[in-house]
């Protein structure tokens, strides 16, 4: 297993600023953060849990957990510790993602084939550690990771395995407006009932409170990121144990992984949501 440096997962509810955060962090020379590189990896792991327990997988495997009775948190953690991912299973997941719009970071076939050729089977945490490194093009990084939305329920297991996590929260009124207005469906999929979305927001807050004292976990508000960007980013670099951002880092704008100017993904036409 590749175990040099540290591993980071950034998560939060859809339309909470997770993409803005991953673009900002990835511009730090010590950080390699892939943007939703393999979302179906988590979804398929959760579907496998349901199958193991004899339940039909629900439409939304990463659901809000409201009044969940089919399994307990300990069942998920125990399953993830025992569940081993091999190359064939991983190849099937990447094949399924070819037409999946939720995968933002895509990889050229030769790069993916090289990574899978040396991939070592193991549990989910080791799989993420390997993939984040094998699929990164940033050789100088000391922190490797990715951003996936709606992944809060995986945090206790991942933290227990030594992976750090950052959770971003946003005012629920702004989240709902971003989900339901204008082009929100382009980034969050089909329209979903307001109560369903509010329960997802509630899930994010519940995990933030539950994990608040864990040394490998950090949460903050989107509103602080956009109104107090430097102090918020300084807090995050301190959490990761890396040097603060140079104050001229974003002088030419926010860039994506390919160095192109990122124009934002706002539902309302503003630049950086």
Image: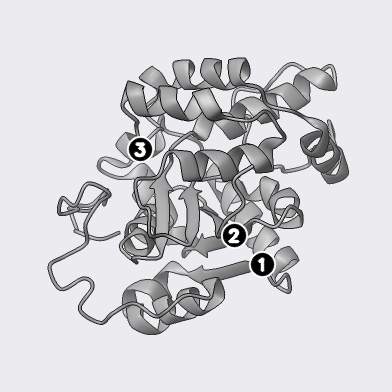
Per the model, the C-alpha gap separating discs 3 and 2 is 19 Å
The answer to whether residue 230 is above or below residue 76 is below
Sequence-wise, which precedes: disc 3 or disc 2? 3
Residue beneath disc 1: 216
Secondary element under disc 2, as helix, strand or loop, is: strand
Residue 265 percent location from the top left of the image = 26, 49
Q: In which quarter of the view is residue 105 placed? A: top left
Specify the label residue 151 is tagged with: none
Residue beneath disc 2: 165
Q: Residues within 10 Å of mark 1 (few under 14, many from 20)?
A: some
Sequence-wise, which precedes: disc 1 or disc 3? 3
The answer to whether residue 257 is above or below residue 235 is above
Q: In which quarter of the view is residue 246 placed? A: bottom left
Q: Residues within 10 Å of mark 3 (few under 14, many from 20)?
A: few
Residue 85 percent location from the top left of the image = 68, 26
Q: Nearer the viewer, residue 157 or 268?
A: 157
Residue beneath disc 3: 105
Q: In the displayed structure, does residue 88 sit left or right of residue 132?
A: right
């Amino acid at each position: 297993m590749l175990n040099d440096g540290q591993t980071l997962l950034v998560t939060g509810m859809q339309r909470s600023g997770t993409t803005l955060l991953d673009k900002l962090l990835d511009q730090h020379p010590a950080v390699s953060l892939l943007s939703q590189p393999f979302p179906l990896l988590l979804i398929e792991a959760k579907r496998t849990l349901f199958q193991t327990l004899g339940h039909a997988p629900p439409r939304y495997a990463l659901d809000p957990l409201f009044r969940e009775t089919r399994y307990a948190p300990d069942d998920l953690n125990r399953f993830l510790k025992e569940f081993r991912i091999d190359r064939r299973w991983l190849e099937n997941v990447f094949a399924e993602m070819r037409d999946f719009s939720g995968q933002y970071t895509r990889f050229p076939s030769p790069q993916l084939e090289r990574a899978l050729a040396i991939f070592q089977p193991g549990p989910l945490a080791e799989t993420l550690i390997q993939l984040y490194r094998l699929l990164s093009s940033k050789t100088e990084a000391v922190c490797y990771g990715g951003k996936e939305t709606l992944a809060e329920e995986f945090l206790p297991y991942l933290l227990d395995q030594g992976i750090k996590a950052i959770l971003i929260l946003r005012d629920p009124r702004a989240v709902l407006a971003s989900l339901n207005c204008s082009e929100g469906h382009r980034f969050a999929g089909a329209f979903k009932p307001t109560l369903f979305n509010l329960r997802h927001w509630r899930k994010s807050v519940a995990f933030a409170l539950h994990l608040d004292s864990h040394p490998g976990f950090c949460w903050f508000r989107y509103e602080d990121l956009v109104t107090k960007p430097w102090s918020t980013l300084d807090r995050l670099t301190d959490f990761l144990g890396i040097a603060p951002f140079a104050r001229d880092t974003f002088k030419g704008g926010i860039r994506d992984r390919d160095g192109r100017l990122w124009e934002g993904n706002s539902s309302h036409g503003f630049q950086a949501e």
